Image (cartoon, grey):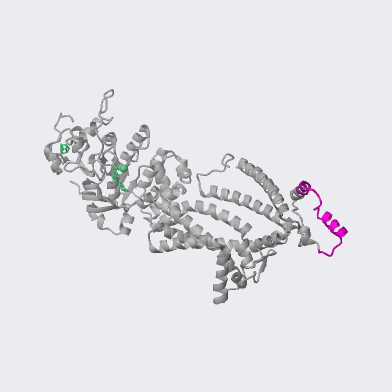
Amino acid sequence: MTAYILQRLIQSVLVLLAVSIVVFLAVYGIGDPIELLVPPQVSAAERAAMIRRLGLDLPIWQQYLSFLGNALQGDLGRSFVHGIPAVDLILGRLPATFELVFLAMSLAAIVGVPLGLLVGLNPESRVSRAIMAGTILGFSLPSFWKGMMLILLFSVFLGWLPTAGRGETVSVLGIPISLLTLNGLKHLTLPALNLAIPNMALMIRLVAAGTAEAKTQDYVKYARAKGVRSKRIVGRHILRNILIPVVTVAGMEFGSLVAFSTITETVFAWPGMGKLLIDSIYQLDRPVVVAYVMLATLLFVAVNFLVDVLYAALDPRVKLTGEMA
Amino acid sequence: MTSPLLDVRGLKTVFHDLAGSWPAVDGVDLVVKPGEIVGLVGESGSGKSVTGFSLVQLIDAPGEIVAGDVLFNGEDLRQASEERLRSLRGDRIAMIFQDPLMTLNPVLTIGEQMCEAILEHRSCSREEAMKEASHALSRVGISSPDARLKQYPHEFSGGMRQRVAIATALLNKPDLIIADEPTTALDVTIQSQILFEVQKLSRETGTAVLWITHDLAVVAELADRVAVMYAGRIVETGTVDDVLDRPRHPYTLGLLSSSAATVAPGERLKQIDGAAPSIDARPSGCPFRPRCGRSLPLCAQIDPPAQVQADGHSYRCHNPVTEGSAL
Ligand SMILES: Nc1ncnc2c1ncn2[C@@H]1O[C@H](COP(=O)(O)OP(=O)(O)O)[C@@H](O)[C@H]1O
Ligand code: SF4
Ligand SMILES: [Mg+2]
C-alpha cells in the first residue's frame, strides 16, 4: 500500500510537470494579453513598465521557470483581469460547480441505476427498448441545445424554474451553498438536469450491460438454487458486482464535470469554475487559464487515485500494490 | 419398501432453437429413497445436469420442461408455485454445482453467502446464522471457521470452496442434496476425502444424495444405487453391486471397461468407440446403436423399453449383456 501510494505520487508529479509545459506553451501561443489589458491612450513608457511588471518582456523559458518556481510555492500567478491570485479566484468558484455536479451525478445515479437494472433484467420488453432509445438521445443531443430546450420548456412555457444564476445561498462553514435553500435548489435544477442527462444515459447503459452479463453467471443460478429471493439476488448479488464498473465510471465523470461543465454553466449563467474558464479565455487572462488547467489536472490525478482506492474497497480480489499501477 | 423421497416419471426437458425443439432429457424415470445415495452416471452431454436442474425446476429459456412428473415427498413440483419452489430450494432440496470457483459470488463473503441460505428460509438472527455456518464449516473439516467466514471465495482453494458448498448444502438439514459433479475439478486425494465425508454426513443426517458424475469409480465408492444415463434416458439402473458387477446394458459395460476403477493395474483402458450423439442428431431406435457391438436389426427400429427384473435391476436393451459376455 505504501509503495503503491509512493508510486502514484511520483507519477502524479510527472503528469503535472508535463501538463504545465504543454499548457504554458499553448496559452503563450493564443495571443498577446497586453493589447487587451492596456488602454490605448496609455503612453509607451507606461506600457513598457506594465509589461515589465507582469514579466511579459522575458523570454518564454524564463517566464516558464519563474511560473514553475512560484507554482511550487502554491502561487499560480495573479489574474490580469481581477488582480487577485488565480488560485483564489478559481477556488472561490469551486463550491458552485461542486454542488452543481454533485446534484447532477446523484440524479444520474438515482435514475440511471434502477432503469439500467430494469433494462438489463428484461432487455426485450417494450419499456426497455424505449429506455435504450432514450439513452441514444441522451448521449447525442448537444449540451447547449438541450440546455436551451430545458429553459424554453421549464422557464419560458411553464414558468416553473428560473433560467440563470445561483439564487439564494446559505453559508456553511463560510462556503455559500444553494442546495439548501428552496430558491437555490430551483436555480440548481435545470443546469443539474442538463449535466445529468448524458450521465444518466451512460449509467443506464453501463448498469444494463453489467446486469445482462451478471444474471447469466453461475453464482446467480447457485443463489436461486439456495432459494434466495429474486429481490436479494438483484439487489445484492448482481448489484454488488456491477457497482464496481459503475463507481469507476461515475468517479471519472465526476472529475471531468467539475473541471469542464463550461457549456452548461455558460448557458445557465451559473457562476462556477467552467464559466470562469470561458470568461478567462475570452479575456486572455493567461494566469487564470494556466492555473485552471493545472488545478484540473490535479483534480483528475486525485479522482483517479480515489477511484482506485474505492475499487479496491469494492472488489475483494483487488489489492493495491506497487506493480499494479 | 420405504416410499420414495423423489419419484420422477417420464421427465422430458427440451431446448428450443430456430430449427426445432431438442430433448436433452427424454423420458427419465428416477427414484431416490430417503437417506440413500444414488449415482447418476454418464458421459458428458448425456443430460445429467439438465436432469438435476429439471428436478428443482431451474430450467431457463431456451430450455423447457415439457412432460413428466417430479414427485417430491408426494408433491408434484411441476405444479408448484414459484414461491413454493423457492422455499423448497436450498431448504428441503439443496444443490452443489460442479465449478466451485464460478458458483460462489466473488464479491460477497463466505459468511454472507452461507447465512443467506439460512435467513431466506428461517427467521433467526444474523448471529445465530453465523454460528450455524461456522459449525457447518467445521463439520466439513475447515479449521478456524469463524475467520474463514469473513473471507472471500478467492481466498479459498478449489477443494476448500467445494467444502464450503457442501457445508452450505447441509445448513438446513435438507431431505435431498443434488450434487452435480462436485469433485470433478479436484485432485483424486481431495476427491476421496470429500466422498468419504459426504457419505458420513449423509448417514448421520439421513439426507439422501443424488450424486451426478461421469466417473463410475466415484459411484462404486459412494453410492447405494446407480442410474446410467445415455442420450437423455436412463438406460440401466439398480443397486451398485448389480449394475457394476452384472451390467446388462452394453453402454454400462463400455463405461466399466473404460473406468480406472474396474481395470486391473497395467491393463489398458478401453474407450467406447465414437461419441455421444448431440441432442439434435439422435439416431432412430436405440440411441446407442451406432456405437454398439451387439446391435440387432430391431435396434434401428424400436427404442427398447425398460425391462425390470425381479430384483429391481432394470435396463433398456434388445440384446442385453449376459454374465461373462464382452462388448
Ligand atoms: N442452455 C442450453 N442450451 C442449449 N442446449 C443445452 C443447454 N444446456 C444443455 N444443453 C444440451 O443438453 C445436453 C445435455 O447437457 P447436460 O445435461 O449439461 O449434460 P451432462 O451434464 O450430462 O454433461 C447437451 O448436450 C446440450 O446439447
Ligand atoms: S438395444 Fe441394441 S443397439 Fe441398443 S444397446 Fe441394446 S443391443 Fe445395442
Ligand atoms: Mg454436467
Q: Is residue B54 above or below residue A38?
A: above
Left or right: residue B243 versus residue A51 is left
Where residue B107 sits in the image (x, y, percent)?
47, 48
Q: Is residue A87 above or below residue A1?
A: below
Q: Quadrant of ligand 3?
A: top left
Q: Is residue A49 magenta?
A: yes
Frontmost residue, B2 versus A146: A146
Q: Most extreme residue toward the top, as rendered?
A: B266
Where residue A17 sits in the image (x, y, percent)?
69, 46
Residue A243 visible in the displayed image: yes
Q: Is residue A190 above or below residue A223?
A: below
Left or right: residue B120 versus residue A75 is left
Q: Quadrant of the C terminus of chain B?
A: top left
Q: Which residues are magenta?
A: A39-65
At 33% from the left and 48% from the top, the residue drawn is B94
At 33% from the left and 56% from the top, the residue drawn is B87
